Image (cartoon, rainbow, N blue to C red):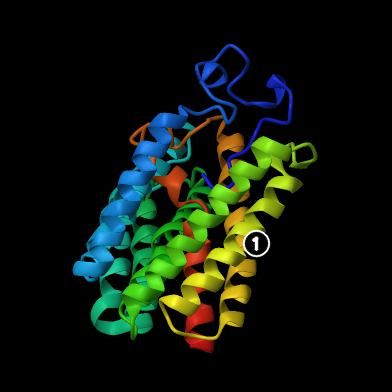
Amino acid sequence: MAGTERPLGSAASDPTGPGSAAAKSPGKAGRNLPAAIGVGGGLGISLILIMVFAPRVWIGVVAVALAVATYEVSKRLREAGILVPRIPLIAGGQAIIWSGWPWGTTGVLSATAATVLVCMVWLLLQQGLGSAPKNYLRELAVTVLVACWLPLLASFAVLMVLEENGAGRVLVFLIAVVCSDVGGYVAGVLFGKHPMAPAISPKKSWEGLAGSLLFCVIGSLLTVTLILDANSMIGVLLGVVLVVTGTLGDLIESQVKRDLRIKDMGTLLPGHGGIMDRLDSLLPSAFVAWLVFAILL
């Protein structure tokens, strides 16, 4: 996840408990660092190759990642007793992602509205027309949250690649988020002493946030100038806002996981957790990057 840093809180602050496997994970960040670097490097190289040689393949990558992430989140919610409708969420998520290709924002918003309507009816029929409601409002609210949090925000990464020099825009966005992650990790491990939000994410520090800001602004300034051939000040602005949105996205997922009393959403990526644990900072950042590019480029 974004900004993974040196633990600052006590073992008791970890919902997994001091005797859990998570508490015994190697490395200062509580992760298998070599595995995390290997997986992250492999994903990064693959995405760069896609952007250079076949940018439209990015749409399929986003669609597959969101299907897996939606499954992970719905599974965790069901384990907590929140019965979100998995099938319409996954199918609707695919409609949201793919509708952006031919119809742009109109297709994305229309598919989102249709997904919400189908989920409303699905939950109604699932509980039975002749029975009294049982957590209908709670499960519907969480369902709408998942639909907006995952496929709707991810659709802006698809809309980005469809714009002029879309591959370059996506590369700048991804490099900025990676720079934020790396800067937060390095500064947090080396200098982290003051916790940012110990009740939510005890590994996050203000020093790590400063590292994220420094790395992300420099990375964004360089990539906006070199890849997009745009004003360097756009890169500075992009770097600042992506650090804010990426950090908040990470904290939001951390809060959700603490509420569910879990460490990771999944186990698919060694050293990282699940797909959703890699998307937490990317999802809100995709929308913000798309907006900055749409307004300023």
Residue 208, image x, y percentages: 68, 46
Residue 264, image x, y percentages: 48, 34
**Residue in the picture at 22% in, 71% down:** 56
Residue 72 shown left or right of residue 206 in the figure = left
Residue 46 shown left or right of residue 223 in the figure = left
Along the viewing direction, whichever of 65 and 243 lies nearer the viewer: 243
Residue 276 shown left or right of residue 162 in the figure = right
Is residue 202 visible from the viewing direction of this image?
no
- Above or below 147: residue 202: above
Please state which amino acid type lies under the numbered disc 1: Val
Q: Mark 1 points at which residue?
A: 244
**Circle 1: is it few (<14), some (14-19), or many (20+) Cα within 10 Å?**
some
**Residue in the picture at 54% in, 48% down:** 182
Pick out the residue farthest to the top.
19
Name the element at disc 1.
Answer: helix
Is residue 282 visible from the viewing direction of this image?
yes
Along the viewing direction, whichever of 141 and 22 lies nearer the viewer: 22
Along the viewing direction, whichever of 31 and 183 lies nearer the viewer: 183
**Residue in the picture at 62% in, 47% down:** 184
Residue 250, image x, y percentages: 58, 49
**Residue in the picture at 42% in, 66% down:** 152
- Above or below 199: residue 46: below
Residue 270, image x, y percentages: 37, 31
Q: How many marks?
A: 1
Along the viewing direction, whichever of 154 and 230 lies nearer the viewer: 230
